[in-house]
Amino acid sequence: MTMFNEAMAMKKELVACRRDLHAHPELAWTEFRTASKIARELKRLGYEVLMGDQCMKEDEMMGVPSEAVLQECMQRAIAEGADPELVSRMQGGKTGVVGIMHFDKPGKTVGLRFDIDCLLVDENSTDDHKPSREGFNSLHPGLMHSCGHDGHATIGLGVARLIAAHREEMAGTVKICFQPGEEGVMGARGMVASGIVDDVDYFLSGHIGLGNGEDDSLVCMTEGFLATSKIDAIFTGKPAHAGANPEKGRNALLAAAEASIALHTISRHSAGPSRINVGVLKAGTGRNVIPDQALIQFETRGGSTEINQYMESEARRMIRAAADLYGVEVRLEAKGSAASGNSSPDMGKEIYEVVKGLGVYKDLELSRHVSGSEDCSYFLSRVQQHGGKAVYMLYGTKEAAGHHTSEFDFNEDVLPLTTYTMTELVKHFGNK
Amino acid sequence: MTMFNEAMAMKKELVACRRDLHAHPELAWTEFRTASKIARELKRLGYEVLMGDQCMKEDEMMGVPSEAVLQECMQRAIAEGADPELVSRMQGGKTGVVGIMHFDKPGKTVGLRFDIDCLLVDENSTDDHKPSREGFNSLHPGLMHSCGHDGHATIGLGVARLIAAHREEMAGTVKICFQPGEEGVMGARGMVASGIVDDVDYFLSGHIGLGNGEDDSLVCMTEGFLATSKIDAIFTGKPAHAGANPEKGRNALLAAAEASIALHTISRHSAGPSRINVGVLKAGTGRNVIPDQALIQFETRGGSTEINQYMESEARRMIRAAADLYGVEVRLEAKGSAASGNSSPDMGKEIYEVVKGLGVYKDLELSRHVSGSEDCSYFLSRVQQHGGKAVYMLYGTKEAAGHHTSEFDFNEDVLPLTTYTMTELVKHFGNK
Amino acid sequence: MTMFNEAMAMKKELVACRRDLHAHPELAWTEFRTASKIARELKRLGYEVLMGDQCMKEDEMMGVPSEAVLQECMQRAIAEGADPELVSRMQGGKTGVVGIMHFDKPGKTVGLRFDIDCLLVDENSTDDHKPSREGFNSLHPGLMHSCGHDGHATIGLGVARLIAAHREEMAGTVKICFQPGEEGVMGARGMVASGIVDDVDYFLSGHIGLGNGEDDSLVCMTEGFLATSKIDAIFTGKPAHAGANPEKGRNALLAAAEASIALHTISRHSAGPSRINVGVLKAGTGRNVIPDQALIQFETRGGSTEINQYMESEARRMIRAAADLYGVEVRLEAKGSAASGNSSPDMGKEIYEVVKGLGVYKDLELSRHVSGSEDCSYFLSRVQQHGGKAVYMLYGTKEAAGHHTSEFDFNEDVLPLTTYTMTELVKHFGNK
Amino acid sequence: MTMFNEAMAMKKELVACRRDLHAHPELAWTEFRTASKIARELKRLGYEVLMGDQCMKEDEMMGVPSEAVLQECMQRAIAEGADPELVSRMQGGKTGVVGIMHFDKPGKTVGLRFDIDCLLVDENSTDDHKPSREGFNSLHPGLMHSCGHDGHATIGLGVARLIAAHREEMAGTVKICFQPGEEGVMGARGMVASGIVDDVDYFLSGHIGLGNGEDDSLVCMTEGFLATSKIDAIFTGKPAHAGANPEKGRNALLAAAEASIALHTISRHSAGPSRINVGVLKAGTGRNVIPDQALIQFETRGGSTEINQYMESEARRMIRAAADLYGVEVRLEAKGSAASGNSSPDMGKEIYEVVKGLGVYKDLELSRHVSGSEDCSYFLSRVQQHGGKAVYMLYGTKEAAGHHTSEFDFNEDVLPLTTYTMTELVKHFGNK
């Protein structure tokens, strides 16, 4: 049986895996059940498995929830079948998992990365929505895999299995990284900072959908990810009665309002696109009280990491000054970030040729410009900085609705097909 | 038995009444159980009772909750013992009640006003707090009589009873108004607009506490209430992805931020104090979405109704312009208002002389300047405009904690004492 | 001849003096010719004369022009008849002059103050305007005595002469202060800080006009001067081409705009009136250059010195923060200030009685509330702080047009009448 | 004698012409002497000459000075040698001139454009500056040809002469446009709107310098001009005394400050670069007066005409709303505009080949990206919209100092060289 036929034959199990993950979505840094499932399977397949501090650098993990929330999610994961011993290795939200396999034949080190977290989206529970109709919709109210990371994790496990089955054809080393917290671009930085991909020669990642929405299609590389920073600013002033003693208050609402407006006045950058958005502002407790509390949640973006750096550093100065303007305190909290990132063009072209040779896609596209941000950019740029090559692909599929919506779903045929293609690419690049 | 002794003898029943009301606090326009209890008692005592449209003008009622909320509160009231027939007369939140009694002896018309609503405060449930310790704390989570209106309603019923018992000594007419929704200054305007006090010659109201915090003390009149308007502004823009297409959004957050800042730039008024406060701003749904929704809750105040009018009219223009600035829509909703108000000085002095003659207070103060706002000002100014005289008093008492806090409580001795004093004043002014 | 008749007989010379001053108006700190004329006359009359550092504290002098401007004005003064030796004693703009006379009879120390500077107003040069019609209009283009300080200086010299003529009737000591730079409230602080009025028991000053606009009228005291501070903020950023490299600029215009708006959001003060005004903003050099220069000229006011202090300190913090907001530098320059000030009520009443006894006014008013600011407040409060009493009066007269306009003029009958009255008051208070 | 040698032989006259223009600089819409000189020379050479309404559309002329200024400049031009009859044809500032010549040989229509106005720059008058040293510096204080348009006009006349001398080698038609008011991008729109280049097949223009600063260099085409709009906003409020009656004022300064800040918050556009700059803000008359007058001068830019349109339309709405915010009036005046513009790439390549064949440049560059704006873009896009091709070149030369500075000067060798090259190009494209 050819590798292609083997992958196709795995479809039933891949679908079962994806549906199990879909029913048990977990947010950033709380993917205890998901990671437990992944680690167990990697061990079963003979991989060396890294977890916790072995593949996560604590200082660089952004937006980790409180210990209380982590504990609660650990309990839920165990109650839903996670291995308590594995869960105990993920203390502090270190839910990253890496499977490593060295092959007999010498060769290159190939890195793969799959993201595994879900979103704060309430899943459509009507029969119009296939996961609900077929009974695998989210068991966690308010949480949903509406960005396809359930599929990513599944493909990662499928590739792990197919590689293991074909280890004698493989060369060098494969490192399969399962990354927590891609949503909000929180997780990659901490994983990359552990050094896990520093020795990688060829790196591959990608996303389900986001191409032309057709089945059996593949975009071999993307370029144009914007660098981004996600930051919260918490202002603390002093309350006072607005009628009796307004002069005794320190107005956090006005500081936050002023900061919001000022942020949007940061000058355009002549070197490329820049973005700023204050997405959320919440301030004050009552109509007749000088507001002593305010929160803004904002993001900067830049066409390059440098431009984003300019935006972030202007923003930080402005927020501090806006606090001074109204005599209030302010605390800034980094909630996420991504570098700018582009695929290595020659590796992309090589993938295009290899995949063309496989003859399994109806529609093959060399390259696509994407807007938006993806923290896989940290993997891409780290590998490239260390002399390796890296590519981000798009796995085309028919989608039921837009990403991040309650009705999102995808054609599960993409699972075996992508499993197959990535395994072939690991074989190809390892043998170079 | 003298009237003073009779009032003292009523203490046990007054306390029971106050504690029953304390345990069943009801917010503005939903005082169905409270009003039902009041109406039933007034009828029992032989008063002519006005309810619903008889004493409330619908157009002038501000901040009435949705029909669904009203229905739910009606059900709760009935479940807690309200008379279904009386409740049905309060459709649309018209929870005001007026008791009228004409006396045989010709004389003046004396008006009284007691406010009956509670606050959105979570009552302290520890034994440190007397209502909790003695088991009459709020049965409605999140709601509390933390401003003493339970006491006001109780005094109103006490006075009604004492007057009825002494009707042969009384002259003219007495009108006892039980007003909903004083908190947020929502209710008085609608009651006054019904014309209920247009024929009143002498008008009396007041508040438990807010004096010097001593028992057996009375402030005979207050002056200085600021006129005020409470307004919400709801901005509606258009969402867009902040990275991909920021120019397609219409930013409601920036409009609200700008409005907030601009409101605070309204020029000072040379004719007297003015105030502006944006107490609450909530905007946006997510960090990477151009915010399409925003809300601000603000209030204006003025040393005179004219100054407040200037503040409100400046504010309304500015909010509309701030919406235009960012190309968003805005809706303004009046949530409450009060006129400026001062007691009639000569009536205040007369009260001082009368009460001095009663010899029941340790500490009697002629007049006190108050800041803040009270919608009783609508009663005061309406009576004064129609040629009558009107006074707002402060009924001194030891308070357990500040008004509007979770620990607020007062010495219940103030109930029979105030009942006595107000009855004497009704007798005095009716006989003029 | 009575003192009244003597004063009336001086009219011709007083008018000549006033018209000479009117034709030679001098701005704050450049009153070289005016002060020279005053000093010469005081010496002639036998007064001890203090000048320069003897009556001016350099550190507290605000808004002094550049040395080049001072030199130019000194030259002009000498060219127009000033005594070069006297002018040389006014180096650095110290144009204050004080005349002191001790009387044989022991008594109180009485202080008087007259302000002597002109305004940046272009005088009406048509025949509709009396000074032009009669040929004594300003010889200095752009400068004009349009606030009556020419009259004040003249009255001061008249009083000096009448006192000297009646020195045997006088008691104690008289100190006649001629103050530079009242406009912009720049000059009093530096004169008062020299300690010149620290030993004064009774202090008198006042203003021509500002009463009811009638001749032969007097307001015996004023109350209500607002404390004020006049400040300039100069912002310095970095220019850049707005098309090619906007991100390289540091935008001083936006900092100044933001400062202006923020200043107007300083919270109202519950203790009394407050004011803020950014009266001038100038920024930028060209449409396509990120503006690197900006200037704002603003003032704060307060119903008390404390409220003004609150306004000023809020303003200073805000301006620095607004500069930080846009990453620019800012320099703050104090340009003037006045304390709040009220006349001593019992001295005002005493004046009322004394002046009534003189029988020379048609209309005598005890007290008037004024808005606006006057740096004579520094004299008033310093004298009061040292245990003395102080009063500011208004010398009624028919005015041709409003103060500070090109058409301002007054009925010169006010000169001998006020000369007479003030001399009587010096006699009265010195003899107490 | 070859055409090249002929051009070289014209150097002395070209230099004389340039120096005469340099000594008599004229601002936008007042180039009466310059245009008169051009028209006279074109007639002399046998060109059909269009002037006034024949080549200018009045409605589209932006920033034309007042009639009084125009009259004064006409007088000066005549006093300095302009032909009164020609000047009279330029009423209303219509100082554009077009010379047209039809050749016997049929062929294409080739358009050329030369801009002729000066800048508001004060020329360096020391001997360090060659024009001053050699005595041809500006005779008009405050005005200077510091952008090389004196050279442009001179080249235009040189080309006209060389073409006329070689008319038998030419084919089709040549239209030589002399455009007023390029500075501030005021003039092109009105000239293009007249339809003058609607039938042009090949269009050529360019600029002295702005390349690599080397002599004998040429950039064959540019791309990247930003579209731009230059707008003034004049706000009119109501003055009031800032201490006595601040509430009676309508604050134009705050409206202008708010507008300035808001303009800088216009959202970035995802389709390409955008720019906004408020370059000048002037408001208020005195520190203690609520400012009733304010002016802002701003510009928008966009990577495409559509993006600039978006910026301008956002800006216009915001300015009106900012005026409403403070209850003041505002008037918007368009002062200039340019479209975005790119050279036609194939025509640029053709120029490159033709010029390479001429063998007269040391340094030949195909294309260069420029930032900034040039209203020649209106010519480029109009020709391209009508099916023609258009190119903007850069004529390299050693510059003494940066464009728009007091020390700007260029090596006059560029005059005959560019005259030659452009004539060759006219010949080439006419004969296609």
Image (cartoon, coloured by chain):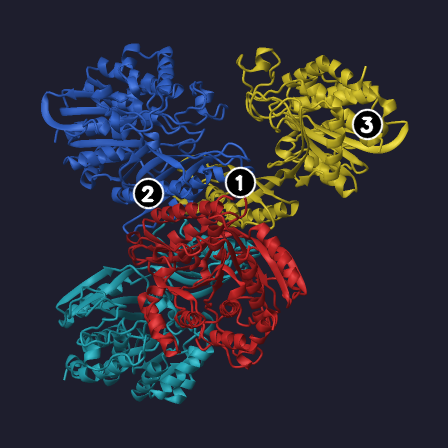
Chain colours: A blue, B yellow, C red, D cyan
Residue on which disc 3 sits: B427
> Callout 2, which amino acid?
Arg
Q: Is residue A253 above or below residue B399?
A: below
Q: Position of residue A307 (x, y in %)?
A: 28, 45
Q: Viewed as shown, does residue A5 lie left or right of D331?
A: left
> Callout 3, which amino acid?
Lys
Q: Quadrant of residue B223?
A: top right
Q: Is residue C178 above or below residue B203?
A: below
Query: Chain ID for label 2?
Result: A
Residue on which disc 2 sits: A317
Residue on which disc 1 sits: B277
Closer to the chain start, of discs 1 and 3, is 1
Q: Viewed as shown, does residue B172 lie left or right of C339?
A: right
Q: Viewed as shown, does residue C392 lie left or right of C80?
A: right
Q: Nearer the viewer, residue C332 or C68?
A: C68
| Label pair 1/3, CB-CB below 8 angstroms | no
Label 3 and label 2: CA atoms lie apart by: 69 Å
Q: Are marks 1 and 2 on the same chain?
A: no
Q: Nearer the viewer, residue B62 or D116?
A: B62
| Label pair 3/2, CB-CB below 8 angstroms | no
> Callout 1, which amino acid?
Asn
